[in-house]
Every structure is written in structure tokens, then in C-alpha cells.
Image: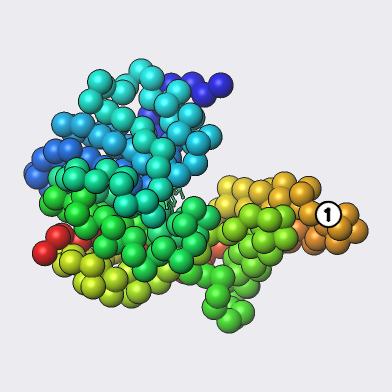
């Protein structure tokens, strides 16, 4: 059971988006890749209405239950896939948020990423906000200890997810996003980068979801050996988080774009 939507601690990304929006009204709001975190923020804003899209039925159910107390008759949680041409066809929203949507597309519509922003263009009336992480998995082994640990955790997680039959996230660089936006009929107005300092929660969630995935790997000897590796990696990373107050590596970005 999921309780009422918690008053989320506003992330620095959402605080930045509020500053970007300034005095302009939010109007109708589309949370194009929704979840409890972004919806917790969106549902507190002074919007005319909101629609929250997710591709995962379990997430839709959780979001439905969590917003029972705050959802107005005009608000809606919608299960759908942006790869389908009929999703929200003909609808236009003043404000559109793509909060870590791009990186997650791989699991719902692989190869669709180059078309995502063109797909969001006709539903965007006034402004599109995109949040994302600069990829840290495909790079060469970083030279700092913190960087090496983040990179190792990312590669370990993705390997476990692939072996278990799932598809890991695939993040895209901000330069790629800016290029795609221009090709898709948007004018990027602002980009802000935030240095990332990964904390205990990152280490635990990434390794724990990897260990969970390993339960579905048929070769139990391989799974056992990988689990031991994961536990050791977790302890090493947690010790480094404690001594350095986190693992400083890479950055996240928020892009503001307007339809041309
Ligand atoms: C990383 S999660 C979202 C983070 C979210 N904003 C939060 O509050 O936690 C990505 C979301 O995008 C959705 N998504 C990914 N690809 C999609 C697609 N092709 N069509 C529709 N939704 C998609 C996922 O189902 C999920 O709801």
C-alpha cells in the first residue's frame, strides 16, 4: 500500500526550474516521464491541470494511490508509451517536464531516443524542461578514486541487469540533447549543470537492485560470484562515501527549451 503523496523535499533541479519559470503561470502541465518524485513536486504547483505519463503499470498504480488526496478532477495519471503516435494526440500543454525520461526510454522503447523530442514538440505549448545525467558508464576508467567507484558501480549494475533479462538505463550527453532539440523544432534557452556527489543512498540502491536482478540469473555459480563482488564493491564505496562525504563525479543538467 502506498500512503498519500509525501511532501517532497524540493530538489535543486526543481528549484532551478521554478526560477526559470519566474512569474509565468504554469498553466496546463505535462509530466512526460512521471514518478512519485516529480509528481510530488508538480502536484504542489499552481497548475490549471496536470497529466502524468508513465510507461510502467506498477508505477501508474502507485502514483494513483499516492495522489488520491491531491488529485483534482481535471488531473490524470496516464499509462502510455511515447513511441505510440496516438498518445495525447492533438493535446497541447503550456509546460512540459521530461524529468530523467530520456535515460529511461531504453527500457520502454529502445532506439526511440532520437525521436523523443520531435514527439514532445507538438504537445509543448510554451516551455519544455529536461533533466538528465551526463553518462558516466561509457567513459574510460576515471582517474579519481571516487570516479572509478561510480563508474564501477554503473558497469556492475548494467551487467547484472542485462544478465537478468532487463534493459539498463541509457543516459545521453547534454550536447546530444541540445542538438536533438534544435533538430526537433525547439530553441534551447538555458542549460545549467550541477556537479554530482553520490551519497550512501546511490551506492545502496544501485547495488541492491543489482543483487535483486542476480536472483533471476540462471547460472547460480556465476550469480553467486557476482553477488560477492557486489557486496565487496558496496562496502568499498560506502567507506569512501563516509571518508570523503560522498563520491564526487560527473554532473546532471537541466535544460530549458522553447518551441520555435
Ligand atoms: C526515471 S523514471 C522518472 C523519474 C520521475 N520523474 C520521478 O519522479 O522519479 C522515467 C519515467 O519515464 C517513463 N518512460 C520511459 N520511457 C517511456 C516511454 N517510451 N513512454 C512513456 N513513458 C516512458 C517511465 O515509465 C518512468 O515513469
Q: Nearer the viewer, residue 24 or 159?
A: 159
Q: On screen, 209 above or below 71?
A: below
Seen as rendered, the residue at the extreme top is: 69
In the image, 17: left or right of 230? left
Position of the C terminus by quadrant: bottom left
Residue 247: percent from left, percent from top: 56, 62
For residue 200, say whether it is visible.
no
For residue 152, say whether it is visible.
yes
Q: Tell me which residue sits at (41%, 63%) in the image.
A: 112
Q: Nearer the viewer, residue 114 or 18?
A: 114
Q: Which residue is mark 1?
A: 218
Residue 231: percent from left, percent from top: 78, 55
Position of the N terminus by quadrant: top right
Q: Tell me which residue sits at (23%, 25%) in the image.
A: 74
In the image, 225: left or right of 183? right
Q: Is mark 1 within 8 Å of ligand 1?
A: no
Determine the image quadrant of residue 43: top left
Q: Secondary structure at mark 1?
A: loop
Residue 86: percent from left, percent from top: 30, 47
In the image, 96: left or right of 84? left
Q: Tell me which residue sits at (69%, 48%) in the image.
A: 208
Determine the image quadrant of residue 236: bottom right
Q: On screen, 147 above or below 257?
A: below
Q: On screen, 126 above or below 43?
A: below
Colour scheme? rainbow
Amino acid at each position: 500500500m502506498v500512503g498519500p503523496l509525501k511532501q517532497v523535499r524540493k530538489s535543486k533541479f526543481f528549484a532551478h526550474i521554478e526560477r526559470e519559470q519566474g512569474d509565468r503561470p504554469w498553466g496546463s502541465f505535462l509530466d512526460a516521464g512521471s514518478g512519485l518524485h516529480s509528481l510530488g513536486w508538480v502536484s504542489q504547483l499552481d497548475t490549471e491541470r496536470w497529466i502524468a505519463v508513465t510507461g510502467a503499470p506498477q508505477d501508474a498504480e502507485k502514483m494513483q494511490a499516492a495522489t488520491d488526496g491531491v488529485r483534482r478532477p481535471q488531473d490524470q495519471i496516464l499509462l502510455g508509451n511515447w513511441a505510440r503516435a496516438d498518445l495525447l494526440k492533438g493535446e497541447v500543454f503550456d509546460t512540459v517536464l521530461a524529468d530523467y525520461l530520456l535515460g529511461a526510454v531504453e527500457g520502454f522503447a529502445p532506439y526511440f531516443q532520437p525521436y523523443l523530442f520531435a514527439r514532445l514538440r507538438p504537445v509543448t505549448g510554451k516551455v519544455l524542461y529536461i533533466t538528465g545525467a551526463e553518462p558516466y558508464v561509457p567513459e574510460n576508467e576515471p582517474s579519481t578514486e571516487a570516479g572509478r567507484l561510480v563508474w564501477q558501480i554503473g558497469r556492475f549494475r548494467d551487467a547484472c541487469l542485462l544478465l537478468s533479462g532487463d534493459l539498463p538505463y541509457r543516459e545521453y550527453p547534454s550536447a546530444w540533447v541540445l542538438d536533438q532539440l534544435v533538430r526537433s523544432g525547439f530553441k534551447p534557452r538555458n542549460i545549467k549543470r550541477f556537479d554530482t556527489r553520490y551519497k550512501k543512498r546511490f551506492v545502496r540502491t544501485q547495488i541492491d537492485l543489482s543483487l535483486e536482478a542476480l536472483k533471476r540469473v540462471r547460472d547460480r555459480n556465476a550469480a553467486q560470484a557476482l553477488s560477492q563482488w557486489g557486496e565487496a564493491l558496496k562496502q568499498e564505496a560506502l567507506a569512501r562515501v563516509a571518508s570523503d562525504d560522498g563520491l564526487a563525479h560527473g554532473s546532471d543538467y537541466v535544460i530549458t527549451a522553447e518551441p520555435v
